[in-house]
Image (spheres, rainbow, N blue to C red):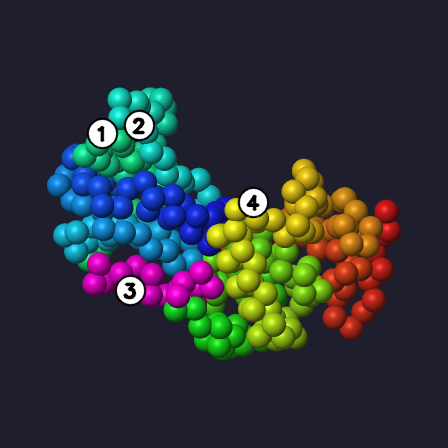
Amino acid sequence: MPEGDSVFRLRRRLEAATVGARVRDGELRSGNAAGRSLAGLRIEGYATHGKHLLTRFDDGTTLHTHLRMQGGWTITRSGRSLPTAVRETARVRLRLDDGREVWGLDLPVVELVATAREGDAIGHLGPDPLRDDWDAAEAARRLSRRPDRPFVAALLDQTAVAGLGNLWVNELAFLRGIHPFAPIGRTDLDALLALAARCLRVSATVPGMYQLTTGDRRKGASHWVAGRAGRPCLRCGTRVRVRDEVQNDPEQRRTWWCPRCQPVPGTVDVGTPE
């Protein structure tokens, strides 16, 4: 699933390619304004909040979209088209004044709102480390409201902190030496949030550092624990464990951890060395 840094980078690409362009023709193909023509509108800018993308037009409306697991955006050059099968998944189509087309593909969330009412769409979200209004103290306050909640579930809750997805939550648990199912109240929230903000910002803005947590770009070595079930921990050699996601339970996604580097609180779990 795309995380906050993924959507931030998408926003930057769309900004560079389309801000200031006018829509020659195009429409919304799903959502609360399905069938609405966007012809004549100018793209004024983009914003993100967590995993949500906001596309702002000059008529005072904003297109709110979310990629979830399957969505994506692409731009085709003038005179080029998408394959029919791909084109049929389009939920947003914008043909720009220079002939290029912007496609929002297989987007599960497509919502047109007044720009002045963007809060109706994203006001429930917690502070976002990639926004200028990032408020670490407020994020810590929200996380501390339920101190017994498991670390991974607490950080995946977008109403507490926006933008952290499964990859970052697992990697942050490792980097802080925290068992993923330990109560969130057992960790130093200020230190955790400072690290989370730094990681997301580097991933979102530094070339070559996208979701690279170990500093090693070699295949299979870019993450400490995420996706490494059964393989040796890159720090201590203990086999990385995994707990599979629980169907229909959003708080039980697939979780990876090193039992030696991230022991259960109050125990010493030496794991199985390689």
For the residues bearing labels 1 and 2, Cβ distance under 8 angstroms? yes
Report the amino acid beneath label 4: Gly
Please tell me which of labels 1 and 2 falls first in the chain.
Answer: 2
Tell me what residue is drawn at x 61 percent, y 49 percent.
Answer: 212
Q: Residue 186 occupies which quadrant of the picture?
A: bottom right
Q: What element carries label 3?
A: helix
Q: Whole-Å distance between the Cαs marked 4 and 2?
A: 26 Å
Q: From the viewer's perspective, is the residue at label 1 or at label 4 nearer?
A: 4
Q: Give the range drawn in magenta.
A: 115-132
Q: Residue 94 occupies which quadrant of the picture?
A: top left
Tell me what residue is drawn at x 68 percent, y 59 percent.
Answer: 174
Q: From the viewer's perspective, is the residue at label 3 or at label 1 nearer?
A: 1
Please tell me which of labels 1 and 4 falls first in the chain.
Answer: 1
Label 4: which residue? 208
The residue nearer to you, when weighing 257 against 243, is 257
Q: Whole-Å distance between the Cαs marked 1 and 4?
A: 32 Å
Please tell me which of labels 3 and 2 falls first in the chain.
Answer: 2
For the residues bearing labels 3 and 1, Cβ distance under 8 angstroms? no
Label 2: which residue? 77
Q: Is mark 2 on a helix, strand or loop?
A: loop
Q: In this view, does 138 lie to the left or right of 235?
A: left
Report the amino acid beneath label 1: Gly
Label 1: which residue? 99
Label 3: which residue? 119
